[in-house]
Amino acid sequence: MEDTNPSPTQDESLDAGPAGVDELGKLVNEYESKLGEMRDLLLRERAEIENQRKRLQRDLEQARKFANERLLGDLLPVCDGLERGLAVETADVGSLREGMDLTLKALLKVAENNGLKQVDPLGQPFNPEVHQAVGMVDAPQAAPNTVVSVMQKGYALNDRLLRPALVMVAKAAGA
């Protein structure tokens, strides 16, 4: 079946006279209008992205600035306890020791609540990934390569080693 409605070619539409020119003028105006709208939209989107970038940068700076706020707020009662202990002038050694013990427990509780764990390997097999051997000693009551004394406890922060424990390790018999 043949097309009975032949579409005008580009040349025919241009030769259509003033009516064709008016049509083309309208199309150009319409496309220029759409182009202007697209430019405006693009500029608005760019401005929005730039504002988001600045906002995120400002939020990141604030987060860095106040990252330790909770931790330091939790430490304030520990500092208060130490100050109260220092203010007492007539304390005997027993009460002073008891106050220091309570303050240490409060400090360790704050540290634990913030992800810090003690590494106290006494009696455990030596592990070079979390222990640092200071020396080896004869310890017939302990199995070889076992930690027999802890000179300084180690610490891990959220399961990442912060400081290894300094330990003495049992020698193998006859070594």
Image (tube, rainbow, N blue to C red):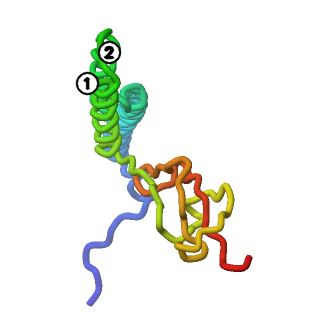
Residue 157 has which mark?
Answer: none
Location of residue 66 in the rendering, given as x and y in whole percent from the top left corner: 36, 27
User: Does residue 38 sit above or below 77 in this rendering?
Assistant: below
- Front-most of residues 22 and 59: 59
User: Does residue 57 sit above or below 156 in this rendering?
Assistant: above
Location of residue 79 in the rendering, given as x and y in whole percent from the top left corner: 33, 21
* Residue furthest out toward the bottom: 1
- Front-most of residues 30 and 88: 88
Badge 2 amino acid:
Glu
Badge 1 amino acid:
Pro
Q: Which residue is mark 1?
A: 77
- Front-most of residues 60 and 107: 107
Instruction: Report how far apart the C-alphas of labels 2 and 1 lie in the structure.
Output: 10 Å
The residue located at (54%, 57%) in the rendering is 149
Res 43 seen here: no
Q: Which residue is mark 2?
A: 83
Whichever of labels 2 and 1 marks the residue nearer the N terminus, that label is: 1
- Front-most of residues 170 and 58: 170
- Check the picture and name the quadrant holding the C terminus: bottom right
Local SS, label 1: helix
The residue located at (45%, 55%) in the rendering is 119
Local SS, label 2: helix
The residue located at (58%, 56%) in the rendering is 167
Mark 1 Cα-neighbour bin, 10 Å: few <14, some 14–19, many ≥20: some
User: Does residue 11 sit above or below 84 in this rendering?
Assistant: below
Residue 108's quadrant in the figure?
Answer: top left
